[in-house]
Image (spheres, grey):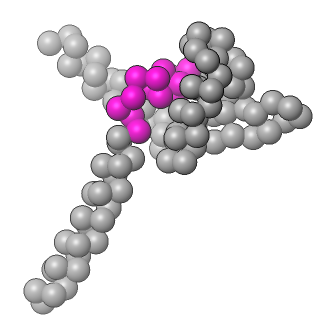
Amino acid sequence: MIQYKFKKYFKNQIYCSRWANYLKVFRDVTRLKIITLLFDKNEMTVEEIVTCMEMEQSAISHQLRKLKANHIVKSRKVGKYVWYSLDDFHVLSLYQMALEHSKENFKK
């Protein structure tokens, strides 16, 4: 019985660790701005994101790689352009909840 509880606890610890690493991706202001753009526009090319954010393409590409590695954004190539969008509705939901929560806290 004790061994079973330990295994269950250990498994939850692994999920908690993964979740903590996932949330670290949202700590960067540039990445949050990219997520916000993709939330508003649904899909954008790297060039469009660079233009909107007025940053170097290499800096934007670096952040997009981190977001893609953590399954926050996805990409598709059409001709010479790579289009980015939020990965799925879970990311949208997480973003919306965090945005609403931050708005409520700023009102206080």
- What quarter of the picture does the N terminus occupy? bottom left
Which one is in front, 74 or 94? 74
Query: Is 42 placed above or below 52 here?
Result: below
Name the spot of residue 49 as percent of width and height, x first: 63, 19
Residue 39 on the magenta segment: yes
Which one is in front, 63 or 11? 63
Number of numbered discs visible in the structure rendering: 0
Name the spot of residue 14 as percent of width and height, x first: 30, 65
Name the spot of residue 100 as percent of width and height, x first: 33, 23
Query: Is 14 placed above or below 99 here?
Result: below
Left or right of 70 on screen, residue 50: right
Tell me where the magenta segment starts and ends, as one range: 25-40
Q: Which residue is drawn at 76% across and 33% down?
A: 82
Q: Is residue 19 visible?
A: yes
Q: Which residue is drawn at 57% across and 34% down?
A: 62
Q: Residue at x 20, y 19 (%)?
A: 105
Residue 58 on the magenta segment: no
Query: Is 51 placed above or below 36 here?
Result: above
Q: Residue at x 50, y 47 (%)?
A: 70
Left or right of 76 on screen, residue 40: left
Among all residues in the image, which is located at the extreme left?
2
Q: Residue 60, located in which quarter of the rendered image?
A: top right
- What quarter of the picture does the C terminus occupy? top left
Q: Can residue 96 be seen in this view?
A: no
Question: Mainly helix, strand or loop, the magenta region?
Answer: helix
Q: Residue 5, located in which quarter of the rendered image?
A: bottom left
Name the spot of residue 104 as percent of width and height, x first: 24, 18
